[in-house]
C-alpha cells in the first residue's frame, strides 16, 4: 500500500486507547493504523511523541460583534492560526444574530468571514430574537444546513431570552435534533448588584466578580435545566464556573437527562485576585461568568475528573487592552463598561496537557475526550472528526510531552496584546499539526493558508442513550393533550 504521509513510531491515543502504532494517511483521510507501515511519500518521525486527534475548539468568539458593537480582535485568519498553534484542527465559533437581524443573513455573513480560516470550521448560532419566522422557518433551515447547535443567553439586556421564549427554542431544537447551549446567569440579580456597587462608588475591575455572584449562576443553571428537562430537550451549560453549577449538571446527568456541561481554563488557573491587579490591569481578567477562588478551582478539577464536564473550551473572546477593546470606555473604565472575555484559544489544550495529564490529574484518554472526541460527538462531527480511526479525516496533532516553555503573548499568534496566562511554565506542546492530511504547522512554522479550512456541515444531536421524554403534562398518553410535536 502507498500513503501520502506516514507518521511513524509515535504513541497514539484516542478517547479509549493508548497504543504504539504508525498512522498512514491517503487523500486527507486516515487510511491505516498498524504496528509498522511503509510506503509513505512523506514520513514524519514521531518517536517519543504523542499522536493525538487534532483538538476541536467549540467555544470561541471570532470576528464577532457584541450587542454593544465591540468587534473581537481576532478574525477567522488570526483566530484559526492561533487555534492551530494550540493543537486545534477545527473550531466552531459563534455566528451572532442580534435583535432585528435574520438568522439566514447572519449565517451568510459568517460563512463569508470564515472563508479565510486555516482550519475547518462550523458555527453555533447565537439566537437573541426568536420570532415566529425564525422559530418556524429560519432555524429549521439553519439546522438543515448543518448548523445543529446554538446559544441563548439568560442574561444581558440586549441578548436575554425570557423563559417562555426559551421553552419555544428548546422545543424547536428538540424537534429538529439541535443542541441548545446556554449562558446561565440571573440577569436581575446581576443588575441589582451592579447598580448598588456603582452607586456606592465601587467601580474597580475587582467588583466585576462581586457583581456576578455564584448564586446568579446556580439559579440560572437550575432554571435552564428545569426548562430543558420539562420539554425533554438536550442542553449544554457553557462556561460553568462554580461548584454549585457543576453539582446541578452532575445531578441532571445522574438522573439520565441529556444535560451537558462545559468549563474553561480561566476558572481553573486564574482567580478573582487577578482582577485586583494595579490600575486598569484587572480589565484583562474581566469575563462572564467571572473568575472565582482557589477552592472553586479545586471543585472544578474534581468535577472534571469525575466526568461532569464533557467539554473543556477556551471561551476565546479577544478584546485588546486598548481603546479598541477593554479600554473603550477610557483608561480607567468602571467594571460594568469593560468588554467581557479573554483570549485563550492557543492555551486551552496545552494547559490541560501540562496541568492535567503531566501532573497526573487526568489520563491521556480523558484529555483526548475533553479536547476533541466529546466535542465531535456532541456537535455532530464524529467519526469524521475527533478521533484517530480508519476513514476519519486526518486531523492529527503530534505532541512533545517533554517540551517545557514559558507562556508569552507573542507565542499565541493571535491579534491580541496580552495573554492572561503570561509567565506560566507549561510542559507538553504540539510540535506538528496536520489538517486533513496536510502538515499545517511544524516546528513553529506555519504552512497553512487562509482558505485551507472548509465548512463542516454537522449532523443532528444523537439522542442514543437518552430517554428524551418530556414531562407527563406534555405526554398525550398521560393527559390526552398534544402540545408539542
Ligand atoms: N459569554 C461568553 O460565552 N463569552 C464571552 C462573554 C459572555 O458573556
Ligand atoms: Zn456566555
Ligand atoms: Zn463565550
Image (tube, rainbow, N blue to C red):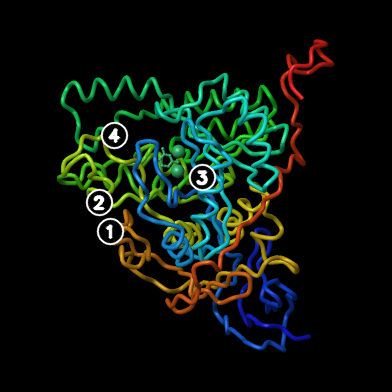
Disc nearer the start of the sequence (2/3): 3
Disc nearer the start of the sequence (1/2): 2
Relative vertical location of residue 185 with respect to residue 196 in this rendering, above or below: below
Q: Secondary structure at mark 2?
A: loop
Label 3 sits on residue: 95
Mark 4 and mark 1: Cα distance apart in space = 22 Å
> Label 2 near label 1: C-beta < 8 Å?
yes
Label 4 sits on residue: 208
Relative vertical location of residue 294 with respect to residue 119 in this rendering, above or below: above
Disc nearer the start of the sequence (4/1): 4
Query: Residue 399's x, y, as percent?
Result: 52, 72
Whether residue 415 is visible to the viewer of this picture, yes or no, is: yes
Label 2 sits on residue: 321
Q: Residue at x 57, y 82 (%)?
A: 47
Query: Residue 213's x, y, as percent?
Result: 36, 28
Disc nearer the start of the sequence (3/1): 3
Label 1 sits on residue: 417
Tell me the mark number nearer the camera, choosing from 2 and 4. Answer: 2
Q: Residue at x 56, y 40 (%)?
A: 261
Mark 2 and mark 4: Cα distance apart in space = 17 Å
Amino acid at each position: 500500500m502507498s500513503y501520502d504521509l506516514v507518521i511513524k513510531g509515535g504513541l497514539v491515543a484516542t478517547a479509549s486507547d493508548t497504543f504504539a502504532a504508525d498512522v498512514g494517511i491517503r487523500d486527507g483521510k486516515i487510511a491505516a493504523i498498524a504496528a509498522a507501515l511503509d510506503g509513505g511519500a512523506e514520513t514524519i518521525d514521531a518517536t517519543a511523541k504523542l499522536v493525538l486527534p487534532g483538538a476541536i475548539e467549540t467555544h470561541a468568539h471570532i470576528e464577532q460583534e457584541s450587542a454593544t458593537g465591540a468587534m473581537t480582535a481576532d478574525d477567522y485568519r488570526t483566530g484559526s492560526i492561533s487555534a492551530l498553534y494550540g493543537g486545534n484542527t477545527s473550531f466552531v465559533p459563534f455566528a451572532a444574530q442580534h435583535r432585528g437581524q435574520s438568522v439566514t443573513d447572519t449565517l451568510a455573513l459568517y460563512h463569508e468571514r470564515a472563508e479565510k480560516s486555516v482550519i475547518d470550521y462550523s458555527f453555533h448560532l447565537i439566537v437573541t430574537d426568536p420570532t415566529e419566522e425564525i422559530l418556524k422557518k429560519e432555524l429549521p433551515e439553519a439546522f438543515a444546513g448543518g448548523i445543529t447547535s446554538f446559544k441563548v443567553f439568560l442574561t444581558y439586556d440586549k441578548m436575554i431570552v425570557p423563559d417562555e421564549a426559551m421553552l419555544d427554542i428548546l422545543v424547536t431544537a428538540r424537534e429538529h435534533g439541535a443542541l441548545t447551549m446556554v449562558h446561565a446567569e440571573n440577569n436581575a440579580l446581576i443588575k441589582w448588584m451592579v447598580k448598588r456597587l456603582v452607586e456606592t462608588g465601587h467601580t474597580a475591575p475587582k467588583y466585576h466578580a462581586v457583581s456576578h455572584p455564584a448564586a446568579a449562576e446556580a439559579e440560572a443553571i437550575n432554571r435552564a435545566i428545569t426548562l430543558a428537562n420539562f420539554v425533554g430537550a438536550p442542553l449544554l451549560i457553557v462556561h460553568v464556573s462554580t461548584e454549585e453549577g457543576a453539582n446541578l449538571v452532575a445531578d441532571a446527568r445522574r438522573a439520565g437527562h441529556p444535560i451537558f456541561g462545559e468549563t474553561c481554563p480561566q476558572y481553573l488557573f486564574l482567580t478573582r485576585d487577578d482582577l485586583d491587579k494595579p490600575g486598569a490591569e484587572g480589565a484583562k481578567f474581566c469575563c462572564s461568568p467571572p473568575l472565582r477562588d482557589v477552592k472553586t478551582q479545586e471543585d472544578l478539577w474534581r468535577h472534571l475528573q469525575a466526568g461532569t464536564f464533557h467539554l473543556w473550551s477556551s471561551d476565546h473572546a479577544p478584546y485588546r487592552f486598548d481603546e479598541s477593546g477593554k479600554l473603550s470606555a477610557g483608561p480607567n473604565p468602571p467594571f460594568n463598561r469593560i468588554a467581557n472575555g479573554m483570549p485563550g484559544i492557543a492555551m486551552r489544550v496545552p494547559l490541560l496537557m501540562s496541568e492535567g495529564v503531566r501532573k497526573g490529574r487526568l489520563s491521556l484518554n480523558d484529555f483526548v475526550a475533553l479536547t476533541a472526541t466529546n466535542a465531535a460527538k456532541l456537535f455532530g462531527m464524529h467519526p469524521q472528526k475527533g478521533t484517530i480511526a480508519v476513514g476519519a479525516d486526518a486531523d492529527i496533532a503530534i505532541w512533545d510531552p517533554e517540551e517545557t516553555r514559558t507562556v508569552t503573548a507573542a507565542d499565541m499568534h493571535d491579534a491580541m496584546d496580552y495573554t492572561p496566562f503570561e509567565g506560566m511554565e507549561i510542559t507538553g506542546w504540539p510540535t506538528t499539526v496536520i489538517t486533513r492530511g496536510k502538515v499545517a504547522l511544524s516546528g513553529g512554522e506555519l504552512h497553512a493558508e487562509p482558505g485551507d479550512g472548509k465548512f463542516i456541515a454537522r449532523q443532528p444531536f444523537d439522542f442514543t442513550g437518552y430517554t428524551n421524554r418530556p414531562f407527563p403534562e406534555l405526554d398525550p398518553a398521560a393527559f390526552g393533550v398534544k402540545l408539542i410535536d
